[in-house]
Image (cartoon, rainbow, N blue to C red):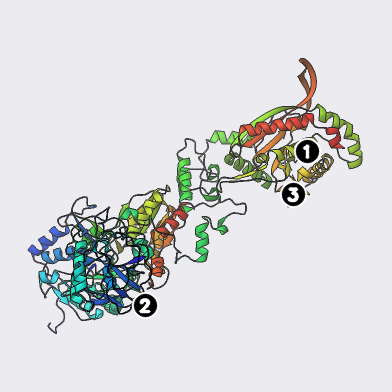
Amino acid sequence: MSSDSPQVAPPPSPAEQESQLNRESAPIVPTATSGVEKSFLEAIYDAMAEEMEADDRVFVFGEDVGHYGGAFKVTKGLLERFGPKRVIDTPISESAIVGAATGAAIMGMRPIAEMQYVDFITCAFDQLVTETAKMRFRTGHGVPMVLRAASGAGVRAGPFHSGQPEAFFAHSPGLKIVIPGDPYDAKGLLKAAIRDDDPVLFFESKYLYRRLTALIPEGDYIVPLGEASVKREGSDVVCITYGAQVSTALSAAAALESEGISLEVLDLRSVVPLDQEKILESVAKCSRVVICHEANPVCSISSEVAAIIAEKGFDLLDAPLRRVTSPQAPVPFAAVLEDAYVPSADDIVAAVREIAAW
Amino acid sequence: MSTTVTMPQLGESVTEGTVTRWFKGVGDHVEMDEDLYEISTDKVDTEVPSPYTGYVEAILVAEGETVPIGTPLCQISETPPSTVVRGLPRDDDSESTLPPMTPPIPAPQAAPVPGAAAPEPPPIPPLPPLPPAPPTPGALPPAAETSVMRAIPLEDVEAAPRADESAFADAVGEAVSEVESIERPRATIRMQYGDAQREHSLHAQPSQMSQPPPPLEEQPLHAHPVEGVDVESIGAEQTTKPRAHVTAEGEKRLAEPVPPEELKHDGSRRGILSPVVRKLAAEHNVNLDKITGTGTGGRVTRDDVLAAAGEPTAPAPPGGPALEPEAGVADRESAASREEPLSVMRMRIAEHMRESRQSAAHVFMSIEVNCDQIHQTRMSYLEAVREEDEISLTYLPFFALAICNALLEWPVVNSRIDLDARSATYFDHVNLGVAVDLEGEGLVVPVIDEADQLTLRELARRIADLADRARSKRLNPDEVQGGTFTITNPGPFGTHLSVPIINYPEVAILSLEGVAERPIVRDGALAVGRTTVLGLSWDHRAFDGSIAARFLAGLKDRIETWDWQTLAG
């Protein structure tokens, strides 16, 4: 690379612009009733492969993503398909990965960098929060990179490999954070993240990789960033949640139906920016709120959602709100403790019952 | 008893493994932690130690075979199987005789293979019953009676000494391949989301294996083995487990829906108005005082307000922005009226009456009673009581005595009912409340504790004392609470019939009307008698009309037929 000051990427040519526009206006399919059944992991792979196919600027790099195919095999096949210039195995240095992604992005590329386990992102905290997040504020130039990371507990991986740290980065202005809860959203959100001109953290639940499947429609589609989605309509209590707990909330809702409590499940999908409109809409509809996630409760996404509801939806509430989260502790390694740690459907049911009867 | 060793998961992304080598064969003894087999996955190749001590009873997956995680690989039994292999000299046979034969171990048909088609797992060939007599060392049972390894031709086993592993392995492989020849389609693993899955450990314990995983669908394996989630059944079979993130105080809060500090002193949460209730009440001009709250503790909920807002006549909220009255009407009204603040007692009575009317299902029943007997007794004792006790003997103590006695016979009329707790409370005593009028300013109900224990004279004295102190406002606070039944007595005013409001949370109240001479029929002819009407208002949620009727009939019977002369003495 030249030692001169970094050059701003040339503006896209008219042809590029047109193809970008066409892709950005791809139809948003709300729910898929037809398509191919894919797992959470496969949907993520498809998103990357399709975007790499359509746009030469998109490339993937991280630890073990190329030859090994990724610790979880998410990127398996990409190297064979796109070659070593677009699928790069990096040294074990998260700070270098994020720094390089930032640099590549401001030079005009669209990197998809990977943190093998999201817990290692703290090694790159400075790059991410100091450089990546603030770039647009400082220079007017955005950083169109995606940082994918395997997150979440439930796989007996212990406290260093089970983290859910979105709260650290939600606090830092300049980063978008997206946490899908099902394969359809995973693919659409990752595509939208790749096409977004700002840095997007894409936290994928390793627990869901092979455990969740859904119908994925043929053809191009995106799920817009910053848009929540009602996954289940209800009228008595709304459970605001994201990630792996969306499935948990849906099963809690099924159990509560038999007790005559109608639980609405609102999947945030993007935790930065939060879809305040949809949140307040659901609160207005139900007047009783339970917020659920597996991340630690102190200063978390649920704290932020609660603040929004208290500030802007004060007179919508018929009962205090409740949070169902893990305890304020690292993820335990012992299986029994880990099972007690992650919010379960029983925990959600108990909180909803309490609020419904208040 | 045999236990199953299953294919372990040696890495998060690993979904299947290949058995590359068996270190033990069928019939071999294996110690816990001794190498049992070697597997190869895309993450790691490794030897796997045996989780149990025992004898390898059956090998279910051959070397070179790739199977999904959780597939049973072999069976290990506590007891040595009786097979042809037993006949061969063994290194660890220090005893001269074989251990006694145990009953045949049935093949694990019940343990489903997570690669099998639903709903029936492929049957593993069952063990035929073993011969009852232990074979003598060195002697081999006849071929027809060989057991689990019947696929091994006798000659092969005889010909192949223990030391020659390859031939032994071949023999084992043949047997296993016979097992393998049963159609066992590759399937995707649909794992249960939730505790059932999370409890799946590397080395399944027997207790876990007794709960078979859910049935699976047949699908061919492909490059990315898929695990699906049965969303509808998530949590359905989760057992209760401690909620780690809920503190002890939180557990208490979860157990009781209403935190104790939010209860008002009288147990009502009517005064708690949530933000949305206040907003909707203002928007829809709904008078919150007129709404029955259906929330916990009587709290008015959002739905209550919305329901009330749907009513045709929603009165204006008190103190809220009132409609502008027409000028002429206001002037005329203000000229003809005056405003006075309501006393605390009035407010309290108003609230109490409203609450009682809105809570209890008020029903009224009355009965006419002939009071000639008690009239005679009253007359005869009037002077004596005035002299001895310095009080006026009224009809009230007579009725009170009969009422207390009747209440003991029909305790449900003396009870309390708690619909939320689905329970009724019965008392073995009667705390009789007697409504006392306070010269038109209000009323108070002093309570005679354990009135059923008192004689007629004692009742007379207590009633007089309480009434006197009630009127002069010298009652103690504990004398106006704790009642189980109330009587009200407008009789001295000469009233005919009244329908009183129950002294909530009691379940019934009795009114005593005026005792007067009225025409009656006796022996078919008109006569004059002293009669009164007893009126019972009661809560139909607590008991039904037949009880009320029986109670009143029992009262009437006591009043008309008791030996009042003796009772008053």
Task: Report whether residue A264 is seen.
Answer: yes
The amino acid beneath tag 3 is Glu
Q: Earlier in the sequence, mark 3 or mark 2?
A: 2
Residue ID for mark 3: B479
Residue B35 — which label? none
Which residue occupies the foreground of this view, B530 or B419?
B419
Dot 1: element: helix
Crowding at dot 1, Cα within 10 Å, few <14 / some 14-19 / many 20+, comes out as many
The amino acid beneath tag 2 is Glu
Q: Position of residue A239 (x, y in %)?
A: 38, 56
Q: Decide: marks 1, 2 in contact (CB < 8 A)?
A: no
Crowding at dot 2, Cα within 10 Å, few <14 / some 14-19 / many 20+, comes out as few
Q: Position of residue B129 (x, y in %)?
A: 32, 59
Which residue occupies the foreground of this view, A244 or B13?
B13
Crowding at dot 3, Cα within 10 Å, few <14 / some 14-19 / many 20+, comes out as some
Q: Is residue B405 above or below residue B85?
A: above
Q: Position of residue B533 (x, y in %)?
A: 72, 28
Which residue occupies the foreground of this view, B130 or B255?
B130
Q: Decide: marks 3, 2 in contact (CB < 8 A)?
A: no
**Callout 1: residue from which chain?**
B
Q: Are marks 1 and 2 on the same chain?
A: yes
Residue most extreme to the top? B525
Residue B401 — which label? 1
**Callout 3: residue from which chain?**
B
Residue ID for mark 2: B95
Total number of numbered labels?
3
Using the rendered view, name the quadrant where residue B431 is placed: top right
Q: Residue at x 42, y 68 (%)?
A: A327
Q: Position of residue B355 (x, y in %)?
A: 60, 43
